[in-house]
Amino acid sequence: MATKQPPPLMKKHSQTDLVSRLKTRKILGVGGEDDDGEVHRSKISQVLGNEIKFAVREPLGLRVWQFVSAIIFSGVAIMALTFPDQLYDTVFEEESINSKTPIRLYGGALLSLSLIMWNALYTSEKVIIRWTLLTEACYFGVQFLDPPRQDLSVSPELH
């Protein structure tokens, strides 16, 4: 019993066959327009989304706020690191301090925050911008909630 040999396989060159390429792209859902009128070049860009359309919608003052915040944080940090006595006198209006270490640690923390602000200024990723703004909000919230110091000395009028 002789078996009949199958015909030789012929390769189909789908890259040169325009109709085949269009059918394949249509089946994959690539190349068509979505609801926003955006034309996808690959299935991966459809699944992951396109970041370009989100980069356009930044609030008007966002970059100005980031720049001003970075400058202020850097300025106060440098002042706390180099001139802790003057910063303490400016903020607390008291004569002298016992140790410069807490103010220098505060300056180091502010310097770290300022570096984060400077790096966020040059990024277009929304997640980094959100976390930077959240960091600022937490910092200002702690500064706002810090109760003012009260003078605990006994005044002569109460005696």
Image (tube, helix red, strand yellow):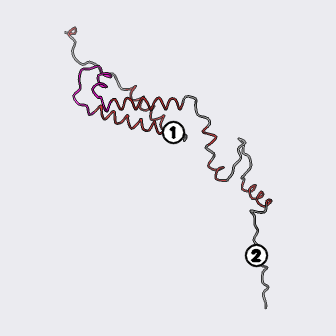
Q: Quadrant of the N terminus?
A: bottom right
CB contact under 8 Å: marks 2 and 1: no
Identity, as a three-letter code, of the amino acid under mark 2: Leu
On the image, the x and y values in percent for residue 63 come to 53, 32
Q: Residue at x 78, y 61 (%)?
A: 20
Q: Is residue 34 placed above or below 147 in the rendered structure? A: below
Magenta stretch: residue 89 in it?
yes
Numbered tag placed on residue 122 in the rendering: 1
Helix, strand or loop for disc 2: loop
Residue at the spot of label 2 = 9
On the image, the x and y values in percent for residue 97 come to 23, 26
Helix, strand or loop for disc 1: loop
Q: What residue range appears in magenta?
A: 80-101
Q: Quadrant of the C terminus?
A: top left
Q: Residue furthest bottom?
A: 1
On the image, the x and y values in percent for residue 24 come to 75, 59
User: Of circles 2 and 1, which is in front?
Assistant: 1
Q: Is residue 69 placed above or below 23 in the rendered structure? A: above
